[in-house]
Amino acid sequence: MTSCPWNIYAEQLFPLGYGHPLWYPEPVGGREILIGDVGWFRTNGQFTPLFNVKSSREDPVNQQNGVPRGFTVFDSPGSRTVFTNPNAIMQRSLCSRTVQTREVEAELSAGSFAFQTTADCGALVLLEPPAESADIESKRHIVNYMRRHFDSWLDFVNGQEGMGLGLEEQDNVFVSGTMKTTHWGFAAFQGNGSERKEGRIIAQFTPYATASLSVSLANASMPRSHYRYGPHPAQEVSVPRNQCLFIHYYKMRRRRPLPKFAMRAAAGPHDLGIPMLRWRWPLTKM
């Protein structure tokens, strides 16, 4: 049975350690993913921010959906420190451990990559480097804040006076880190593991034209549902670095009759059969 491309993509790129791979990195409704976002993953793998706890209730990012009752800004000495790395990813391609790539040609506006694999699944991401990371490292402040406010978040997303989404507790996540670039292209594939698969990706990432991507596998075109690229269309010569490739996040799970536990999820959609959680409270490495 063929898996959804966003599940293949996330499962294959999770072990790289950059965070939860997003099949939809572009801003939703013009609103990019930000540190401090509280949101959820749709069934198609898209992360949807609901409100931002590092911004005031009057901030434009909180105007569309509003904020929970008793909302207070996440603002403590530790939470104000955001560690950034403007050169977190310098290479033009990342691929799952099952895939080997070779850059055939690289020009200012385009790059061509050959790849091969004998594994059943594989995934690649091409990007316009560098990609910039930003993270809040104050785990204790995040955990304490979530424990104080999590019940009001649930009322906001599920209550009759709220959004009525019907989410489970563990579906609500707090974004503590992002990895962003300007242009990107993804591909995810699944096939017979006994067959050697070879392919070629041609990507064009330029601020002067719409991004484009074409993928071929074993002399045949890959279904468009199994690759994406962006941003498109590029409307400005100077494209902002607002395309979020990976996120780190925390989520809460109650173990009744014990107190709530806040856990940091390293990556992976909710249905992946791989270890997702790196930290929990008390801070014990998993």
Image (spheres, rainbow, N blue to C red):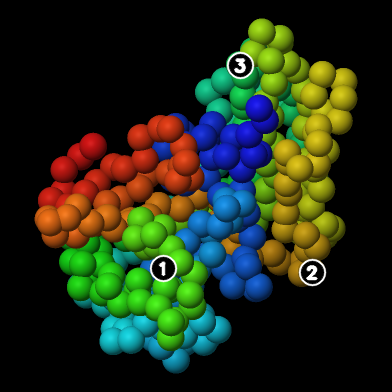
SS under mark 2: loop
What numbered label is drawn on residue 38? 1
Q: CA distance from mark 1 to mark 3?
A: 36 Å
Question: Nearer the N terminus, badge 1 or badge 3?
Answer: 1
Q: Residue at x 43, y 86 (%)?
A: 161
User: Residue 77 in the image: x percent, y percent?
Assistant: 20, 73
Residue found at x 42% / y 37%: 17
Determine whether the residue tagged by mark 3 lies in a helix, strand or loop.
Answer: loop
Specify the quadrant of the image occupied by residue 48.
bottom right
Asked whether 30 or 238 is in front, the reply is: 30
Query: Of callouts 3 and 2, which one flags the residue occurring earlier in the amino acid sequence?
Result: 3
Q: In this rendering, which labeled residue sits more in front, label 2 or label 1? A: 1
The residue beneath circle 2 is 235
Which image quadrant for residue 82?
Answer: bottom left
Q: Mark 1 is on which residue type?
A: Val
- The residues bearing labels 2 and 1 have C-alpha atoms spaced at a distance of 29 Å
Q: Position of residue 151 (x, y in %)?
A: 27, 73
Q: Amino acid at mark 3?
A: Ala
Which residue carries the number 3 mark?
A: 119
